[in-house]
Image (cartoon, rainbow, N blue to C red):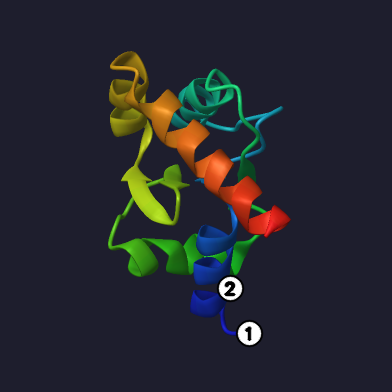
């Protein structure tokens, strides 16, 4: 599987995923830490990719989404954005709904 196919697969098969610097337990930049905190507060599980452990993802994800910075958050297969957009959505209550809806769709897929 080529790297762009791998990224696409990760985005499409996880209801919510963050490509970040570090891990949710040990974020390695403030933007990743704040984005993870917002996702965590939504009350649903989410996947993550530590871009420092996946150099090919690190190099190619900006090209995949035409989004140059990290973290990158995807919900229901679509790019939500980076830290600032994620926090804005969270503060408006929209992120919680998006993540819960995506998790419910993910459950439907696994039980179908």
Between the C-alphas of marks 1 and 2, the distance is 6 Å
43 with respect to 62 (left or right): right
Kindly identify which numbered label has been placed on residue 1.
1
Crowd around label 1: few <14 · some 14–19 · many ≥20 (10 Å) = few
Image height of 46 relative to 94, above or below: below
Determine the residue located farthest toward the front in the rendered image.
112
Image height of 49 relative to 13, above or below: above
Query: x, y percentage for residue 100?
Result: 51, 32
Q: Is residue 20 visible?
A: no
For mark 2, what is the residue? Answer: 6
Q: Toward the viewer: 84 or 54?
A: 84
Q: How many marks?
A: 2
Secondary structure of the residue carrying tag 1 is loop
Determine the residue located farthest toward the bottom in the rendered image.
1
Secondary structure of the residue carrying tag 2 is helix
Q: Toward the viewer: 11 or 68?
A: 11
> Residue 70 is drawn in which quadrant?
top left
Whether pointer 1 and pointer 2 mark residues with C-beta atoms closer than 8 Å, the reply is yes
Q: Toward the viewer: 97 or 25?
A: 97
- Name the residue: 64% across, 61% down: 54
107 with respect to 91 (left or right): right
Q: Toward the viewer: 72 or 74?
A: 74
Q: Could you tell which of marks 1 and 2 lies nearer the N-terminus?
A: 1
């Amino acid at each position: 599987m080529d790297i762009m196919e791998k990224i696409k697969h990760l985005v499409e098969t996880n209801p919510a995923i963050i490509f970040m610097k570090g891990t949710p337990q040990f974020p390695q930049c403030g933007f990743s830490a704040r984005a993870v905190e917002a996702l965590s507060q939504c009350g649903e599980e989410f996947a993550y990719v530590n871009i420092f452990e996946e150099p090919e993802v690190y190099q190619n994800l900006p090209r995949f989404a035409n989004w140059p910075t990290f973290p990158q958050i995807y919900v229901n297969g679509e790019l939500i954005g980076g830290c600032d957009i994620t926090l804005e959505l969270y503060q408006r209550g929209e992120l919680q709904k998006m993540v819960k809806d995506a998790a419910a769709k993910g459950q439907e897929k696994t039980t179908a």
